[in-house]
Amino acid sequence: EKGGYEHFMLKEIHEQPEALRRFLVGRLNDESVHLEELNLNPEEIKSYSRIFIVACGTAYHSGLVGKYVIEKLVRIPVEVDIASEFRYRQPLIDESTLVIVVSQSGETADTLAALREAQGRGAKVVAITNVVGSTIAREADEVMYLRVGPEIAVASTKAYTAMVMAFYLFALYLGQIRGTLDTEEIQKAIAALKQIPEQVKWIIENTESEIQKLAEQFTKHENAFFIGRSVDYTVSMEGSLKLKEISYIHAEAYAAGELKHGTLALITNGVPVIALVTQESVYEKMLSNVQEVRAREAWVIAVALEGDEEIKKSAENVLYIPQTMELFTSVLAIIPLQLLAYYVARLRGCDVDQPRNLAKSVTVE
Ligand code: F6R
């Protein structure tokens, strides 16, 4: 059932190119995005004044990517909330608010309660989920399915990358209907999206053995930091969660610009810092953050765009991902971090597929 892999997690990481390809089928052609499955009429789409994205854990992290992408491409304000916070804080939503709940399992108790809270306040709820017939799928007004197949490992991998793809597509769809994107921009974005499954495959093929070597050095550490700016910051959070939940190494994610406001005090000789450096618009700023941590003798592992030679001067190790549109790097940049978490956890003898204290589906709050 593990298809020759030692763990479900590794199998699911490797399934991503195929899973993401399946996610895209029928949802776009060269010219436009097709999400008629959502049954949202254009007038309604034009009426949204605000979007809320609500989820837990990894699904929440996909929502953070969603915020960057929707705000940039559609210019609608987006708020992202953790379901257990949203449900108890009397959220300010009304009929012109679209609420998107994200849940791989479709059964997470807090996310389901958030969905009901939103509907009770008159908002329409779109669910992004993997499980057909799940409670969230049944109760939501509209559903977009991830189609990645069963995810068995507790640590989410292929569902996360599909959730991120769902937000890319959804943002393009809104932009197409609300007219914030012209035909040329949409075509360019679609061309970039179509390459993603192949690019994910490339990353796995080109980084896996290097990451296995890095993992040997990594296992002896008890603390790690993940830093990034813009969408790279959201990927840092997801990378950090993956590492801590399966390897039990304490990890924290920071917006790189925040380091000086406290955390830099913890950056000393040899401390691993995973720096995401894929955002061209903040490249110079990020480079100087990398130099700052290097100056404190941190061990810097960078995730950077293919062709970036500059970063090699400041990072000991560089894991490359292929070039894509700036907003779409997150789905690629997480792949090496999933692999790193996996190999470190395996070397530490952890129960990779079933980390201590955790359950795949959290049906109690
Ligand atoms: C971490 C992980 C969890 C889930 C969270 C929500 O790898 O998988 O953080 O993302 O428990 O689960 P779903 O998406 O099923 O609502």
Image (cartoon, rainbow, N blue to C red):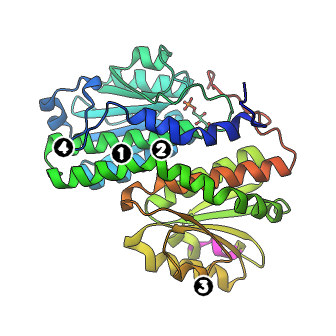
Estimate the spatial distance between the alpha carbons at disc 4 and disc 2, rounded to whole Å: 22 Å
Query: Which residue is under mark 1?
Result: 168
Label located before the other in sequence (4 or 2): 2
Label located before the other in sequence (2 or 3): 2
Check disc 1: other Cα within 10 Å, few if <14, some if 14-19, many if 20+: many
Q: Quadrant of residue 276?
A: bottom right
Q: Pointer 2 and pointer 3: residues touching (CB < 8 Å)?
A: no
Residue type at mark 1 is Tyr
Residue 282 placed where, x, y %?
41, 73
Estimate the spatial distance between the alpha carbons at disc 2 and disc 3, rounded to whole Å: 31 Å
Estimate the spatial distance between the alpha carbons at disc 3 and disc 4, rounded to whole Å: 41 Å
Q: Is residue 329 above or below residue 362?
A: below
Residue 194 placed where, x, y %?
37, 46
Secondary structure beneath dot 4 equals: helix
Q: Is residue 174 above or below residue 323?
A: above
Name the residue nearer the viewer: 206 or 353.
Answer: 206
Label located before the other in sequence (3 or 4): 4
Residue type at mark 3 is Lys
Q: Is residue 75 above or below residue 176?
A: below
Q: Magenta span covers which residues?
A: 261-265
Query: Which residue is under mark 2?
Result: 62
Residue 113 placed where, x, y %?
48, 23
Q: Is residue 297 above or below residue 247?
A: below
Query: Which residue is under mark 4?
Result: 176
Residue type at mark 4 is Gln
